[in-house]
Image: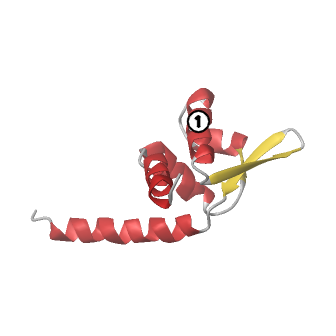
Amino acid sequence: MNSDDVSVKIFKALGHPIRLKIVKFLLAGPLCVCVLHRSFDYSQANLSQHLKILREAGILKREKIGIEMHYSVQLKGIETLLDAMDMTTAEYFNTLDF
């Protein structure tokens, strides 16, 4: 796997609205999956699938603390990437004629 493959994997993982929201939510710090479940209106199975995809892309990591599973952002560059994406989105909207 080369760097382009890794980039595509990361962008694909972030390319779903739910996963993007999860990552943005976790930028504030690690959270228990139970808190994530309460914060998002998705079934536990759906949330678990999205978390798995983010883990497999290397974006998130998990740690078991007691009986709870905690998730956090593993790639610190993700915050910079998301900031750049927000700026690009704002730029995109500025080019539209309403």
- Report the colour scheme: secondary structure
> In the image, what residue occupies the spot 54% across and 64% down?
78
Asked if 49 appears above or below 92 in the picture, the reply is above
Q: Where does the image place residue 30, in percent across and percent down from the top left?
A: 71, 56
Q: What residue is shown with label 1?
A: 47
Name, please, the residue furthest toward the right: 66
Asked if 80 appears above or below 23 in the picture, the reply is below
In the rendered image, the quadrant that contains the C terminus is bottom left
Asked if 87 appears above or below 8 in the picture, the reply is below
Total labels drawn: 1
User: Toward the viewer: 28 or 3?
Assistant: 3
Name, please, the residue furthest toward the front: 1
> In the image, what residue occupies the spot 38% across and 67% down?
86
Residue 68 falls in which quadrant of the image? top right
Asked if 39 appears above or below 7 in the picture, the reply is above
User: Toward the viewer: 13 or 28?
Assistant: 13
Q: Where does the image place residue 66, in percent across and percent down from the top left?
A: 90, 43
> In the image, what residue occupies the spot 69% across and 45% down?
35
Q: Where does the image place residue 31, in percent across and percent down from the top left?
A: 71, 52
Q: Where does the image place residue 76, in percent across and percent down from the top left?
A: 61, 67
Label 1: which secondary element? helix
> In the image, what residue occupies the spot 41% across and 48% down?
15
Amino acid at pointer 1 = Leu
At label 1, counting other C-alpha atoms closer than 10 Å, the crowd grade (few under 14, some 14-19, many 20 or more) is some
Residue 16 horizontal side relative to residue 30, left or right: left
